[in-house]
Image: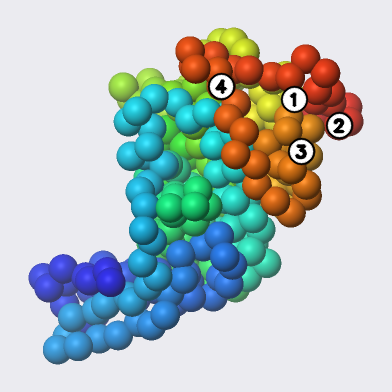
Amino acid sequence: MKALKPQFQPGSLERERFLREGKLAAKVKSPYVVEVFDIRVHEDRAYIIMELIQGSSAKDRLQKGPMTLAEALRVGEDVARALAAAASAGIVHRDVKPGNILIDAEGQAKLADFGIAKDLDESKIQALTTTGDGLGTLAYVSPEQATDARQVDHRTDIYGLGATLYHLCCGRPPFMPTSAKVLLDILDRPPPPLSAFAPDIPPDIAALVARMLEKNPDNRPQSAQEVAQRLREIRLKLGFLRSAGSESTLDARSTDGQLKIPSDTDLRFGASPQG
């Protein structure tokens, strides 16, 4: 259960956003999204009653270092499927990051926290997001969202997932938010290639992540479903899935932590995307 702090009274912007968060999350039906069961107000205090996930966040998992490739690709595919469901419901999450991804005991990832989500069918968003307010978390925010969060569409979430996948694979986001200069980097500078921090990353994964991080939304994959499908194909060809519908216990790394890719695995499932 998630409760709004008692100092936020009826009619406050914080309370309105909190109740709206529960309503938007409840619109997204997917096994890859934390389910909201009810939104209640009791004695002027608001509550969101939601699914309890027995596990930890991807952010917590990253405290131990980068994920194995098998882990990262599974989380990436699960979150892509969550974003596809959100897009189908007309919802833009706008805050995709490791801290908003919960991983259950079986390793399945679930997207959480629709606190700054945008409803594409809701004109009232204008009152809840001020002009020029990028919202989101700087290390994972798209250039267009950093400029004006009101105008973004589902492709900002594809950027956020790309930045998250980058972090899961190499242990750091594409741009480190250590100074105000990072905003200029997000807007104007290409991110360092993923291979700069994960030299053994398969080229197709690096290419997909780079395409997801394109500055121009038109140059990114145009749907989360496309991203999910590409990640599924890579997982199958790497041997991380026994079949299209089953998970494998294979780990992407050897005991010394280095990526271990079968030599006879052909990773190419099509022409590499052009930026």
Q: Amino acid at mark 4?
A: Arg
Looking at the image, do the residues carrying marks 4 and 3 touch, with CB atoms under 8 Å apart? no
**In terms of image quadrants, where is residue 203?**
top right
Mark 2 vs mark 1, CA separation in Å: 8 Å
Residue placed most toward the observer, 208 or 169: 169
Q: Is residue 84 visible?
A: yes
The residue under the point 58% across, 72% down is 29
Can you say whether 107 is above or below 165 in the image? below
Q: Circle 1: is it few (<14), some (14-19), or many (20+) Cα within 10 Å?
A: some
The residue that label 1 is drawn on is 204
Name the residue beneath numbered marker 3: 236
Residue, x 43% and y 74% (percent of image)? 36
**Marks 2 and 4, how far apart at CA:** 22 Å
Lower position in the chain sequence, tag 2 or tag 3: 3
Tell me: residue 185, above or below residue 110.
Answer: above
Color encoding of the figure: rainbow
For mark 4, what is the residue?
253
Q: In this rendering, would 167 be left or right of 138? A: right
The answer for how far apart the CA atoms under marks 1 and 3 are is 13 Å
> Is 78 displayed left or right of 54 in the figure?
right
How many numbered discs sit on the rendered protein?
Answer: 4
Whichever of callouts 1 and 3 sits on the residue coming sooner in the sequence is: 1
Q: Amino acid at mark 1?
A: Asp
In which image quadrant can residue 212 be found? top right
- Mark 2 / mark 1, whichever is N-terminal: 1
